[in-house]
Image (cartoon, rainbow, N blue to C red):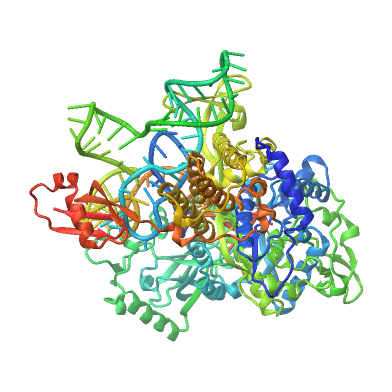
Amino acid sequence: MHERYEAAAVEAEAQRYWDERRCFEAKEDPARDKYYCLSMFPYPSGRCHMGHVRNYTIGDVLARFMRMQGKNVLQPMGWDAFGLPAENAAIANGVPPAKWTRDNIDYMRMQLKSLGFALDWRRELATCRPEYYRWNQWLFLRMLEKGIAYRKTGSVNWDPVDQTVLANEQVIDGRGWRTGAPIEKREIPMYYLKITAYAQELLQALQGMHGWPERVRTMQANWIGKSEGVNLGFTYDVDGISGVLRAFTTRADTIMGVTFCAVAAEHPLAAHAARADDRLAGFIAECKRGPAIEAALATQEKKGMPTGYSVRHPLSGEAIPVWVGNYVLMSYGEGAVMGVPAHDERDFGFAKKYALPIKPVIEVQGKPFSTDAWQPWYSEYGRCVNSGAYDGLDYRAAVQAIAGDLRRLRLGERQTTWRLRDWGISRQRYWGCPIPIIQCDACGAVPVPEADLPVLLPEDLVPDGSGNPLAKHAQFFACRCPRCGAAARRETDTMDTFVDSSWYFLRFACNDNARSMVDARVNYWLPVDQYIGGIEHAILHLLYSRFWTRVMQELGYVPFAEPFTHLFTQGMVLNEVFYRKPPAGRVEYFNPADVQVTVDSQGKRRAAFLRADGGEVLSGGVVTMSKSKNNGVDPQALVDEFGADTARLFTMFAAPPEQTLEWSDEGVQGAYRFIKRLWKAVFDHTAQGHPGRFDPEGLNTAQRELRRQAHHTLAKATDDIGRRRTFNTAIAAVMELVNALARFPADTPADRAVVHEGLEIAVICLSPIIPHATHALWLALGHRTAIVDERWPIADAAALEQSTLEIVVQVNGKLRGRISVPAGADEHRIRRAALADANVQKYLGDGEIRKVIIVPGKLVNVVV
RNA sequence: GCGAGAGUGGCGGAAUUGGUAGACGCGCUGGACUUAGAAUCCAGUGGGGAAACCCGUGCGAGUUCGAGUCUCGCCUUUCGCACCA
């Protein structure tokens, strides 16, 4: 063993050992308990970022811990390799997305290997490879057969200058990111997956998913958004057309307060009214230009315009004016809402703005109503008033009576609606999985025959920002109709990349199978025991994966409905932002690595300066690492300077894994320093030769106490890693132990033997976190076998026993003394000792003791 | 706007089931070693006070013998909102 800790050499040696022995190649073994530990696979954007390091370190700590617990562990890695950034890079550099993606994968694979993750690289997959995406196409065709996939029109962002469809993130303030042109919405035919048909089961199953964080389950439940209410029809007979305008409400008890109806700009009634009304047509066009993003839609000013039509109230028969509203979503319900200004805040604002009548029909006891200003209790439940036959009824009774009456009139009934919408998977983009459909003039949309799969994506095209290159590439789209043989056109839309990521976790079990999507090995490894990824995926990716798995179960391909038994959502990685704002021009951001921060003699922040020019820069606070804020930290630089173990230790120690992690260069130094201290402690200890065994019964008090601390640390680290997933507190406990061990005077053979055991415990507890250094230290401690193959030890209950306990004494809840009592002392004895304490006596004074509360082993509170 | 989280020293955080607030680390201060620096080691470090003590977990109420933890209201902040992944 070297006296100095040389990270590079230590890490190369440990990695060589693991590779040579193929330690992390997972083999199916029905006799053993499997543990499938999966971190969300990365998008190969170019280089790993700290978010990846954090995510994969969490997964690796768990995988290594479970391996030492005796589990047959599978931890694979792959690449979410289709997507928009590859096309953007192609536009910027002229490199085909395929080459850019492959180069990125090669570099990032090297980076992940240098971090020493216990991955089975034989199972690596990339979603852009035909061996993978052919199964997207195959299952899509199965869904088409079953009616789970279907075609309908949907709206997209259209850039009229580039003649191209833009993603939401490419639309900035309603304009195209490259052209600056105002974006239009376009209706085009697309493919959808019927996730709404699974809404009920996706919602219901959440209740039993105890391995998922409560908040993720709540978010998914809210996203699915089941609401039970009443569907009601407003009949109309206008301009030669008649029909029923259908609206949904969860507040049928307020139905007598309806003073207007509002429809979406895309609603047929709006279009009909606009034929003869240019102003209305202009307004509808304006609404259609408006934002597609729900957040923007919800914050924009509520606007409306009357259609001039009115509809009949289903119960009163009153004429109700119909408006077009920019806040009404065509995609929710049937694109129409009833307006009850007196009891809905949005409707109230709308009515005030356009001077529509406000008719209160609910009375909340003791709370006044005025049309002057909205008050929160206007939307509370109460009793019906001004509602004819329904007067006096409470919410439940009113809804029951009203639903019954609507039913008799055949103008409505109870209904359950969902916020969840079907999943549109068509993308008018090149770098994705081709949708296996052929458009024939005679036969329509014809599925590509299974024998012709995969529909290969040409890999040599370079997008230029104007439209989908596939649509300009006749070699791709020109084909024959499989049904009638006539000349036909291949579908040039590709699939949403969420399709790729909705089942990759299955394929890791069988990525070498060229004949089928899944096989029996999936039944062994799946479901995933522990899934780890960012909280930003709490809804979409995880919900789509749950849906996809349910479909595969229904079609008989997998025997389970839920793909992820336990879910862990890690927090974001943040760093401080530094910038300058020139008098004219854009804000300039500086990387924190180039900034020097000065502090005063109390350690408080003074100012920050740019190293390059010595000028002051301002702090913009601590935010998520991003390219735009130039506050990212390159993991590679970190690994090169300090080694992978330091990077891993810092990310696990600086914050609990579920919370945000703030970057700190000093914190990294601290992690490095600790590894060096541990290294030195083992070196100093082993330099004196190997100590013999010790007799646990023959130890003195100091030795016994040190041994107790070592076993307490082991018990705590086991619980923190295995159950609580608070790696930061496990590390803190081991640091305390190492401090105690280093301080302990090792004079006698028994001293040294106890220290030896303590060092072994420290090294074992840290081995999932800093596997390279502990690999070397374990051998240095005299072991012949590698620590990676060691079993996780169990704390010795006898070593944990304490003969005396310290108990805190409070008087009226304030800390006034400490007493020491034998471990087995009864309440009577504790009480007597507490009351006898000198300082406690002082505070008791002459007061009468009203109550004594004793918390066993912890505390006594005397109430005077 | 809607949905879901978070807020504790100069900083990151600890306090697991309502029971000693500030573990561990960083920073800072003083010291040792050194020609000097780096590295390393030792001691101190929530605020106020000479001390006894008092005050302290975003703000304001409440429950309790006891609240960082539970309840209600507010403020600030982070994540998601369906074509970024």
Quadrant of res A191:
bottom right
How many discs appear?
Answer: 0
Whether residue A410 is visible, yes or no, is yes
Quadrant of res A376:
bottom left
User: Residue drawn at (54%, 60%), measured in percent from left and top?
Assistant: A722
Image location (x, y in percent) of residue A47: 71, 44
Horizontal side of residue A355 vs A775, given as left or right: left
Image location (x, y in percent) of residue A642: 65, 37
Q: Say which quadrant the N terminus of chain A sits in.
A: top right
User: Residue drawn at (61%, 23%), measured in percent from left and top?
Assistant: A611
Furthest-left residue in this view: A846
Q: Which of the two residues, A594 or A773, is positioned nearer the viewer here?
A: A773
Furthest-bottom residue in this view: A408
Q: Is residue A214 above or below residue A686?
A: below
Image location (x, y in percent) of residue A581: 56, 27
Q: Which of the two residues, A713 or A355, is positioned nearer the viewer here?
A: A713
Whether residue A149 is visible, yes or no, is no
Q: Which of the two residues, A820 or A754, is positioned nearer the viewer here?
A: A754
Horizontal side of residue A537 vs A259, given as left or right: right
Q: Which of the two residues, A741 or A41, is positioned nearer the viewer here?
A: A741
Image location (x, y in percent) of residue A634: 66, 39
